[in-house]
Image: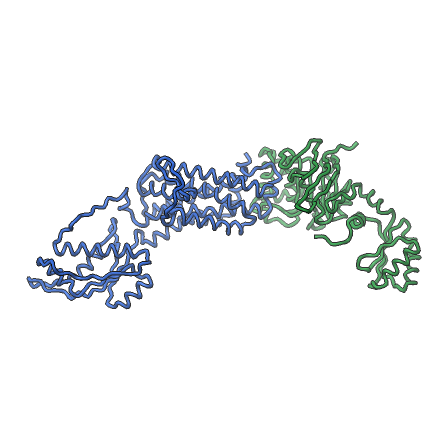
Chain colours: A blue, B green
Amino acid sequence: MKFLTVFLKTCREMSRDWLVVSLSVVFAPFFVFLYWIWFSGGSTAYNVLVINNDTGAALANGAALAAGEEAIQAIQGVHYADGKPLLKVVRSTDRTEVDRILRERGAAAFVVIPEDFSSTIKSLQEGNRMVTAQIVFGGDLTNPYYTLGSIMALTALEGYVQKATGQQPLIQYIEQPLGAYAARTEFEIYVPGVIVFAVIMLIFLAAMTVAREVETGTLRRLRITPMTSFDLLGGISAALVLVGVASVVLTFVTAVALGFRSQGPMWVAMLVGAVTSLSIIGMGMVVACFSRSVSQAFVIANFPLGLLMFFTGAIFPVPQPTLFRLGAHEVGLFDLLPPTHAVVALNKVLTLGVGLEGVLYELTALVILSVGYFALGCWLFQRMHMR
Amino acid sequence: MNNVVLQTQGLTKRYGSLIAVNDLTLEVYEGEVFGFLGPNGAGKTTSINMMCGLLQPDAGGVLLHGQPISAGDKEARRKVGICPQEIVLWERLTCLEQLQFVGQMYGMERRTARQRSEKLLEELDLAEKRDQLASKLSGGMQRRLNLALALVHDPDIVVLDEPEAGLDPQSRVKVRGYIQSLARAKTVILTTHNMDEAERLADRVAIIDHGQLLVLDTPEALKGRLGEGDVLEISLNGQAERAEEASQALAREGIPVALDAAHTSLTVRALNAANLLRPILEVLQAAGLEPGEVRLRANTLEDVFLQLTGRKLRE
């Protein structure tokens, strides 16, 4: 009953602090929108600098062969499943200029087509297999875009050479993507991560909401009532879950409006988002136990935030040491962080088209972690603020 | 025979080497206004927290209606209402909402809490502000709301910590009148530094210092202990270097005199203080001192307080 009273009181307070609540709710949808702009509504196009030194060649029938130009067309023809370009050719004639652009990360890689490229292609067409041409490529190896840009450009060049010379590949490699990944735009691939990111940010709101009760002294007034830690933290958490769910739902709506397609049932993804928000709020309660003011809660929350962002796969995958096995599942250290399971579950549902039964393990883990962090928060709060 | 509502027996609390409350034994009677006085750091708050079941004593115990209570005792909490000195309100709740909220947190039914809240708002002249956010209230209104929050669950015992602090004269009169109206129906424990407030409101006064109970009696009886009669205060016009000499001269004449720490004034307490004025002035003139302002007033509780706790500044 007191839990419900705190819940209603927190809802009232939040409704009057509309700026903070609104920002919390629209944070993720706004990021989805930014990602959509960033990827031009689809996926990243990687810039490839091309220096075409090819001088061309005359074919036996008198026609001119411009193999260098054709190779550039082949690079430009690489595209995503939705037809949007994957590589963008940026022409140059000056190697110094090319290096400058690469240093400034204006392009992913460079390719230099040699002077004898057309004549070599011509010789190969005529059956002379003893000739070869050297295509130089490279770039800033520390640039995350380099690997993808250079490999895709060279694959396009290889394809052009095989086609132009009639050479059959010695071995054919056939890619079989998992689920619907191949048909996904980069924007769609990133949406699950943004949703998890949005939920992670709830840790601030949760910790600061509780810390405000400590800072303003209202907790002391509540301490002299027969209220328990569970009543207070439970009521506040329930109100914050509403914010979390609203944010998750609005994020999905925004994503769908911008072209996102879920492969699995959307309600399962929303359920995962809601349970994840509960677990993050539980962590926020733990943070609040160590905070005596709102500003202190903000600072302390940054520590778990770092762990949640960088060690859960929300931003990039991380290897984790296995602690033990649970049936078919390896349980690692970072599995103690709720977003680890949320990332996997959302990816399964949204990208691979899995239903509820496919994410039961992750959902169970999230529920257990939610209960665990909330119980830890209540216990710590009782010890640190209620005595 | 007075009914004892609250009783402490050898109540002791230590924080490391500091003994915050030392063997405190006292009784609070039902329906009385009990003044709990002491300098800063004397142990008032620690004592109150133990009396209300918020803090576990290291030794001794507290009986509420004859039943022992312990820290975290929920029943004890329902019977006690505490109004802290500082204003503690939920800024984004209206007056009615926060009273109702606190009432419900004490386990009251929603409807009962609402009725009780509206009654309190009426009694404390806040009815017109019932739907106004606490952050929008004036300081005096906030303090009255602060008081109402301690009473919303209709406790038997109300602890008021400096209830008149920061109030304008109008609000002070209102709050004082309200506290007086509470007396008899409820037991009021009043902690304050304002001796005038304690003297006007309290039926009995306990003065503690360094965690120990120094005296406990009615204000009149305490003033009587200090010495019946009046107080004569004579300013020495800044002639501090000769004050000690004059003080000794008066003492030789058998006049009970006290010299303040800064040697700027003499204080004489006696039944016939007015009659002593002439001989005092003669002694001072003989000592070459020109007296300044002379004031004759009645003994106050503040005199008792300073007599018992000294004039040295505290934390």
Q: Is residue B298 above or below residue B184?
A: below
In the rendered view, does A227 fall on the left or right side of A57? right
Image x and y of residue A358, in percent: 34, 36
- In this view, the residue in front, A187 or A281, is A281
Q: How many marks?
A: 0
In the rendered view, does A287 fall on the left or right side of B197? left
Q: Residue at x 45, y 39 (%)?
A: A369
Image x and y of residue A150, in percent: 26, 57
In the rendered view, does A175 fall on the left or right side of B169? left
Image x and y of residue A34, in percent: 37, 53
In the rendered view, does B300 fall on the left or right side of A321? right
- In this view, the residue in front, A71 or B244, is B244
Image x and y of residue B252, in percent: 92, 56
Q: Is residue A295 above or below residue A345?
A: below
- In this view, the residue in front, B55 or A216, is B55
Residue A122 sits in quarter? bottom left
Whether residue A352 is visible? yes
Q: Is residue B3 above or below residue A301?
A: above
Whether residue B121 is visible? no
Q: Residue at x 81, y 56 (%)?
A: B260
Q: Residue at x 70, y 34 (%)?
A: B63
Instruction: Locate the N terminus of chain B by quadrant.
Output: top right
